[in-house]
Image (cartoon, rainbow, N blue to C red):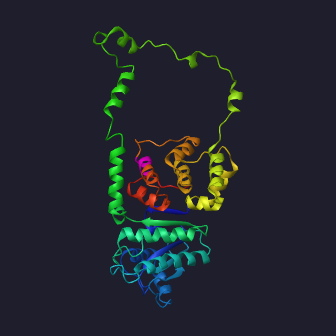
Amino acid sequence: MPLQIVRNDITKMKVDAIVNAANSTLLGGGGVDGCIHRAAGPKLLAECLTLGGCKTGQAKLTKAYRLPCRYVIHAVGPRWRGGRRGERELLASCYRVSLELAEKAGCETVAFPLISSGIYGYPKAEALQVASETIQEFLAGHDMTVYLVIFDKKAFAIGETLFSSITEYIDDHYVDSHTDPDVERRRRQNSPEWAPDDSEYSEPEAAAYSPTVAAPEFLKAKPSKTLDEALSCLDESFSEMLLRKIDESGMTDAQCYKKANIDRKLFSKIRNDRLYKPSKPTAIAFAIALELSLEETRELLLKAGFALSHSNKFDIIIEFFIERKNYNIFEINEALFAFDQSLLGA
């Protein structure tokens, strides 16, 4: 997946490069900066001493030494001063310059912390938005896998208004919390363990509840096709429907799989195998990329053997965004992460 939000210790990430939320001296400090220097060992500090510091919004690359990655990219984020001193532009520049350095060094995988969101005081929800938007813009024109690493769940928060709206929507639709009494009554009536007292009903009513019911006509009919004949009548597959929808949308294949946060190699497998069965998050990612309606999303999912259910928080969150015509896959993934659900994409 091109962009993943993960909960991990960035010093343990086995990627080509990790990004250090550094200060302008590049000589180590607290938080992520201190952790990276301690894990890398004294040789990292020795190399940083030769770099002459770094300006806010910029980044510099060093070796990784004892770390499991190849490089450390030291990015200097802005201190939060109310948001009116160019903080957003400087923070976006940190991500953009870091990604450019990683690409120049031949990196295919890069891990970022949430820059400036610690002791520099940048509001976490806004810092996350800047990170995801800037990374998304870069990935639209480049093939790279980027991880946004959250060390502690407490360090992560989507906007309070959005979180409350999703929570309310889940509460209104989650079947465990809101079982329809009429549906529940009918379910019990249809259960073989439930049988009414015939004395409570007239003869026609009692007959309606009798467990002895004539078999449906389709069960009486003799099969008209052999198995081979039935298998020859397969409906449009997931892959075929997806490719048709891409053509109808006017997007190129690359535009679609990048918008879906899907790796190029995975898309190639789907394109070349008409019977390819994707995971549910992958199928939904394409529905989001194509901006399908809820009905069209259900149809595409059905081709892959899946459905949307109100007994599943993941499904309800997806439904929440589609109903509101919000097809930003990174915002959706932020919400899914906040609610401990699988993310969309490969």
> In which quadrant of the rendered image does the N terminus lie?
bottom right
Q: Is residue 237 above or below residue 28?
A: above
The magenta span reads 313-317
Q: Nearer the viewer, residue 337 or 126?
A: 126
Q: Is residue 64 visible?
A: no
Q: Give the x, y percent position of residue 180.
A: 33, 35
Residue at left 47%, top 76%? 92
Q: Is residue 29 visible?
A: yes
Q: Give the x, y percent position of residue 199.
A: 28, 9
Q: Which secondary structure is most common in the magenta stretch? A: helix
Residue with the most extreme left position: 200
Q: Is residue 228 above or below residue 192?
A: below
- Taking the image as shown, residue 262 lies to the left or right of residue 163, namely right
Q: Nearer the viewer, residue 35 or 327?
A: 327
Q: Is residue 37 magenta?
A: no
Q: How many marks?
A: 0
- Taking the image as shown, residue 108 lies to the left or right of residue 202, namely right
Q: Give the x, y percent position of residue 306.
A: 52, 42
Q: Is residue 326 above or below residue 35?
A: above
Residue 304 falls in image quadrant? top right
Residue at left 35%, top 63%? 159
> In which quadrant of the rendered image does the C terminus lie?
bottom right
Q: Give the x, y percent position of residue 116.
A: 39, 76
Residue at left 67%, top 55%? 268
Q: Nearer the viewer, residue 176 or 290?
A: 290
Q: Is residue 315 magenta?
A: yes
Residue 309 falls in image quadrant? top left
Residue 302 falls in image quadrant? top right
